[in-house]
Image (cartoon, grey):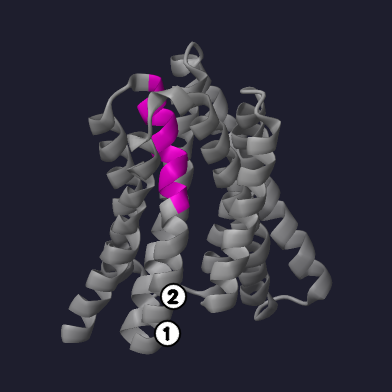
Amino acid sequence: MERILFSFLVTFLAGISTILGIIPCFFKDKKKETIISFSLAFSSGIMLTISFISLIPEAVILFRNIFKTVPLVIICLIFIVLGIIFSLLIDAKVEKYFSKNKLYKLGIISIIVLMLHNIPEGITTFISTSKNISLGLSLSVGIALHNIPEGISVAVPIYYSTNSLKKAIFYTLVSGFSEFFGAVIAYLFIAKYVNDFILGLILAITAGIMLHISLYELLPNSLEYKKNKTTIIGFILGIFLMFLCKSLF
């Protein structure tokens, strides 16, 4: 029972680190466009890199336990494309309600995408920690580090589109708390029945969603502020940070 409680605690702390993404919201408004441009590009680099060095490879490893090479690649690509299509549908739905405020729309899409990402992440962290504390701790530290820039992708658009720090904090907390929700789902329903195919499916679809929001939403919106150097620096730093986290954890 103590290990279960510890697994919940570790997952909660990894998820709640997302709240640190509100830090850019405290910078001076004079640099508003630079902050937004940098944050969106930085988040784009983060999501793109997570997809290519973490989500897709992990999905491939899981599918490899079930399928041969050719079917494995085809199945993985199908689920990635399904993720992209799903993200397009989310974008179209959100567009109906927030078409007049592109930045706010981007924040809402980021919340939805990150919740879809954080729930399976929470499941993985909880299950890993409950089986191997050392593995769970190292995994949770890596997740906590990349949750911070993910929090930026929610907090910055929400804050600068509404001028409400309370909304930025609330939505960022909702995004981060979904990780703990994943742990609850794992404990109540999934832990006993989860298999490689289901986890691989979730990871591949999430990768597709992240690829779409990174290349179709975050990066183009960053470029709209015409701060090209800032966009390039933010994008490269996002990629570099994720490679650093991957090498350390």
Q: Please tell me which residue is depicted at 36% across the width and 80% down the height of the picture.
A: 137
Within 10 Å of disc 2 (Cα), the crowding (few <14, some 14-19, many 20+) is many
Using the rendered view, name the quadrant where residue 134 is placed.
Answer: bottom left
Using the rendered view, name the quadrant where residue 215 is placed.
Answer: top right
SS for tag 1? helix
Label disc, if present, on residue 219 of the rendered structure: none
| Callout 2 amino acid | Leu
Within 10 Å of disc 1 (Cα), the crowding (few <14, some 14-19, many 20+) is some
Image coordinates for residue 152, horizontal then vertical, percent:
43, 43
Task: Give the residue at mark 2.
Answer: 139
| Callout 1 amino acid | Leu
Where, quadrant-wise, is the N terminus in this rendering? Answer: bottom left
Instruction: Assess whether mark 1 and mark 2 are in contact (beta carbons under 8 angstroms).
Output: yes
Q: Please tell me which residue is depicted at 31% across the width and 49% down the height of the picture.
A: 19
Label disc, if present, on residue 135 of the rendered structure: 1
Image coordinates for residue 125, horizontal then vertical, percent:
39, 72
In the image as oriented, which residue stretches furthest toward the right?
A: 70
Where are the magenta residues, as a range? 149-161
Image coordinates for residue 136, horizontal then vertical, percent:
38, 80
